Image: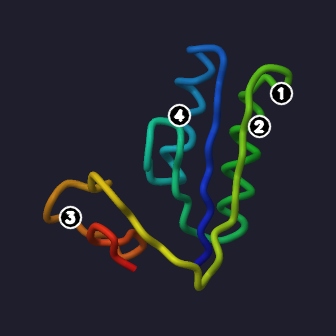
Amino acid sequence: MLYWIIGYDITDSRRLQRVHRVVLRYAIPLELSVFLLAGHEIDKQRCMEEISSLIDPDTDDLRCYPLPARGLQERIGKATLPAGIHWSGLPSGQNSI
């Protein structure tokens, strides 16, 4: 399993809604336009290809960053998931590693 952070800035509200719906099929939202994709290289490629077909490359911004396999994973602040729901790919507590 590999992990990527996907983020975007879409200038048109209609394209933004379309991109958001596509990314939700592949990744977990961390913020409004920042997502964690956990999967294989082919999953990331499919997601990026599908999003790329929807954006305007002159005005929109799409980024995808790989996370290191053994890197520090830490969360500070409000939990990403509701209390009582834990996903092993996300840090479980404040300042946890």
Q: Is residue 54 left or right of residue 82?
A: right
Residue contact between numbered discs 1 and 3, judged by CB atoms under 8 Å: no
Residue appearing at x 69%, y 65% in the figure: 66
Residue appearing at x 44%, y 47% in the figure: 29
Q: Earlier in the sequence, mark 2 or mark 1?
A: 2
Q: Earlier in the sequence, mark 4 or mark 1?
A: 4
Q: What is the secondary structure assignment of the residue under circle 2?
A: helix
Q: What is the secondary structure assignment of the residue under circle 3?
A: loop
* Residue matched to label 1: 57
Determine the CA span between mark 3 and mark 4: 23 Å
Residue contact between numbered discs 2 and 1, judged by CB atoms under 8 Å: yes
Determine the CA span between mark 2 and mark 3: 32 Å
* Residue matched to label 3: 85
* Residue matched to label 2: 52
Residue contact between numbered discs 4 and 2, judged by CB atoms under 8 Å: no
- Nearer the observer, 19 or 95: 95
Q: Is residue 24 left or right of residue 22?
A: left
Determine the CA span between mark 4 and mark 1: 16 Å
Report the mark closest to the observer, 2 or 3: 3
Q: Earlier in the sequence, mark 4 or mark 2?
A: 4
Residue 53 in the image: above or below residue 1 = above
Classed neighbour count for the residue bearing mark 1: other residues with Cα under 10 Å, few (<14), some (14–19), many (≥20): few
Q: Quadrant of residue 19?
A: top right
Q: Quadrant of residue 81?
A: bottom left
Residue contact between numbered discs 3 and 4, judged by CB atoms under 8 Å: no
* Residue matched to label 4: 20
On-image quarter of the N terminus: bottom right
Residue contact between numbered discs 4 and 1, judged by CB atoms under 8 Å: no
